[in-house]
Image: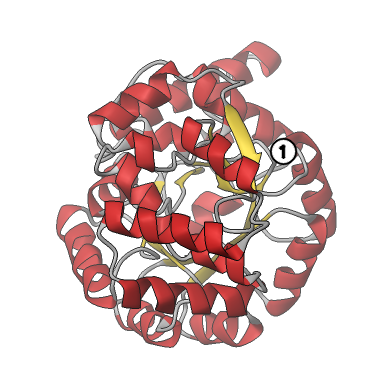
Amino acid sequence: MSDPVDPRLQTRATKLFGCRYPIVQTGMGWVANSKLTAATSSAGGLGILASAPMTFEQMVQAIDEIRSATDAPFGVNMRTDALDIDKRVDYVIKAKVPVASFAQAPGEKIVKKLKDAGIVVMPTIGARRHAEKVAAWGVDAVIAQGQEGGGHTGFVPTTILVPQVLDAVDIPVLAAGGIFDGRGLAGQLAVGASGVAMGTRFLMTKDSWVADVAKERYLQATVTDTVVTRAIDGAPQRVIRTPLIDRLEKAKFLALPKAAANALRFRKMTGTSFASLLKEGLAMKKAQDLSWAQMAMAANAPMMTKAAIVDGHLEVGILPTGQGVGAIDDLPTCQELIDRIVAQAIEQFDRLCGPH
């Protein structure tokens, strides 16, 4: 039988998700596979599977793998502009996945469909107005990701965004962006958040399948080694600054021929078929109102990320990360990490208020 959880760590989020601790591992593309998701949930947090870069069949298999590894609650992150989003949503409902997560606004129709089936809906937002919009649709919780967050991110720092969102909506708010330890968890709970969501900290664990050479690069990074760029797919992304990113930044998408040539060059390096590249690009162009030049690069961006963090080809790939990467210097297991975060948070509570 598990030890009782400190009541100061029992929040609206833990009750909503059914997990022990208010700690969420975000659905990072190419990183949050079935192993990392199951390891996080087994350790008492809420693991979220990143289904966006998976085929439908791969998503189904990954959900089965998670269920075989743990009976703890977990989530599945989906991309709302996926060509088969309706099919994916239907399967998440059929499989009774506890939580559906979205990096983009899921739309009122999808929210209603999932909620009617008893699935918890939790999108990630980067501005107060976005939180108000999705809350009006009936979502159950939001992840408020501040500017310090990795991958696609907004422009408002976490310390400003989270209080704004808390003032705007009456649903559980998970704070994200620059959070990497128990002090961050305690601080966000003190502000009023119902928990924290972390990506980079879980990427840098033994349970993450990120290539060893990429993990080593992350360990070497400092808090000033990241940059927010639109040069990858037209939307702001925080990544580790590399010679590749510098080259893309200088190009600025001013010329379609140059962008197309780059996309085809990366396609060859990453092994993406031209048909897949074109199909992905056209979907992104329509959903994100990209220029043709931006589309040419955006279509191959997911494979460029895979090239770096999964295959270890740092010279041709992208390394998404939060600014907190510079404060992380080890690779624990998910169990070790969550146990440490919980102990640190309780230590902070005791220091401020005395033992419970």
Q: Is residue 303 left or right of residue 192?
A: left
Q: Is residue 39 left or right of residue 261?
A: left
Residue depicted at x 56% and y 58%: 233
Viewer-nearest residue: 85 or 45: 85
Vertical comparison of 98 with 87: above or below: above
Instruction: Give the image quarter of residue 179.
Output: top right
Image quadrant containing the N terminus? top left
Q: Which residue is mark 1?
A: 158
Residue 219 horizontal/vertical position (percent): 40, 20
User: So how many labels did they put on this image?
Assistant: 1
Vertical comparison of 144 with 61: above or below: above
Count neighbours of disc 1 (C-alpha within 10 A) and say few if under 14, some if 14 to 19, many if 20 or more.
many
Vertical comparison of 275 with 11: above or below: below
Residue depicted at x 46% and y 66%: 299
Residue 279 horizontal/vertical position (percent): 41, 79
Residue 253 horizontal/vertical position (percent): 64, 56
Amino acid type, residue under disc 1 in the picture: Thr
Asked whether residue 328 is in view, the answer is: yes
Q: Is residue 293 left or right of residue 209?
A: right
Residue depicted at x 69% and y 42%: 146
Instruction: Give the image quarter of residue 95.
Output: bottom left
Q: In the orientation shown, which residue stands out farthest toward the left?
A: 68
